[in-house]
Image: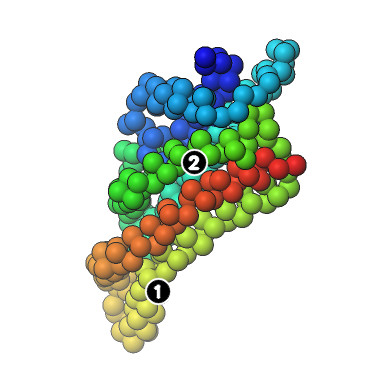
């Protein structure tokens, strides 16, 4: 028989994680469907995890519920780390080639972004689904209860250090993926700076603006396959990172 209290705790963790989970947290993904998926997964997970004694007082139960929500949000944040890195990549590339304005709305995330960010977001989402990473991440939800049972989370310095280190990796992702565009932009700026000194009558800014966009978009298209390989490598590491954070949260 399904224990309602345990099911509620599992539902809170899963639903909180889906609130940030890649693709499932998209603005065009219905909230009702997200909650229904969380309820279904909770029903499937509950029978295969160890039953945990719940607090008898109301404040202890509220504290346990808040803990499960916090765990879900933390795990969802870790699983979304690559997409945060791609936002940084898009900002760097758009600034280098002059496409940072006007800003648009990403139909998937609902946030403000540029055209480069929309392309990269769709690319990462397609890779994430085609590599079956959503299946592995859902399996990882069930495996987290091996390391992190209900009410067993502990805020330790090791867990906080690990999350901060993973956050800092988004900057590394951004620099690695945007490096070709940054190099080309530097060369273009250098060439037009020399031309500006050699031919003072030339309007360097006006002439370089169009050239930067054309060359930048060309390089962006030619390096798309290389970016896809890097993004796929980061996505493949997500399940292990997911469980590693859960294990750190479950240790004293």
**54 relative position to 186: left or right:** right
For discs 1 and 2, the disc positioned in front in the rendered view? 2
Q: Residue at x 29, y 64 (%)?
A: 225
Q: Secondary structure at mark 1?
A: helix
Residue 75 image position (x, y, % from top left)? 54, 40
**Image quarter of the C terminus:** top right
Q: Position of residue 50 (x, y in %)?
A: 60, 28
- Which residue is identified by label 1? 183
Real-space Cα separation, disc 1 to disc 2, in angstroms: 39 Å
Residue at 32% over, 74% down: 204
Q: Secondary structure at mark 2?
A: helix
Q: Which mark is residue 140?
A: 2
Please tell me whether residue 188 is drawn above or below residue 153 in the rendered image: below
Report which quarter residue 194 is drawn in.
bottom left
Front residue of 45/172: it is 45
Q: How is the image coloured?
A: rainbow
Q: Residues within 10 Å of mark 1 (few under 14, many from 20)?
A: few
Return the disc, 1 or 2, that comes first in the chain's sequence: 2
Q: Is residue 86 above or below residue 71?
A: below
Q: Is residue 85 visible?
A: no
Q: How far from the left and from the top, in percent, is residue 12?
A: 54, 25
The residue that appears at 39% across and 22% down in the rendered structure is: 36
Residue 68: quadrant of the picture: top right
Q: Residues within 10 Å of mark 2 (few under 14, many from 20)?
A: some
Question: With 116 as the anchor, is 148 left or right in this view?
Answer: right
Return the residue nearer the eye: 195 or 27. Answer: 27
């Amino acid at each position: 028989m399904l224990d309602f209290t345990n099911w509620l705790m599992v539902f809170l963790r899963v639903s909180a994680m889906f609130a940030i989970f890649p693709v499932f947290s998209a603005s065009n993904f219905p909230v009702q469907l997200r909650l229904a998926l969380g309820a279904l997964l909770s029903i499937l997970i509950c029978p295969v995890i160890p039953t945990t004694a719940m607090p008898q007082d109301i404040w202890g139960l509220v504290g346990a519920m808040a803990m499960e929500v916090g765990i879900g949000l933390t795990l969802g944040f870790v699983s979304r780390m690559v997409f945060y890195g791609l936002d940084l990549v898009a900002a760097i590339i758009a600034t280098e080639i002059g496409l940072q304005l006007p800003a648009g709305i990403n139909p998937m995330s609902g946030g403000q972004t540029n055209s480069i960010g929309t392309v990269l977001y769709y690319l990462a989402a397609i890779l994430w689904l085609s590599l079956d990473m959503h299946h592995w991440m859902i399996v990882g939800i069930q495996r987290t209860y091996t390391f992190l049972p209900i009410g067993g989370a502990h805020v330790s310095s090791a867990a906080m250090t690990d999350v901060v280190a993973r956050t800092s990796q988004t900057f590394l992702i951004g620099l690695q993926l945007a490096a070709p565009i940054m190099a080309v932009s530097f060369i273009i700026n250098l060439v037009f700076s020399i031309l500006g000194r050699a031919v003072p009558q030339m309007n360097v800014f006006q002439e370089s603006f169009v050239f930067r966009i054309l060359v930048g978009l060309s390089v962006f298209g030619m390096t798309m396959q290389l970016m896809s390989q890097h993004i796929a490598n980061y996505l493949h590491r997500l399940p292990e990172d997911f469980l590693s954070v859960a294990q750190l949260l479950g240790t004293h």
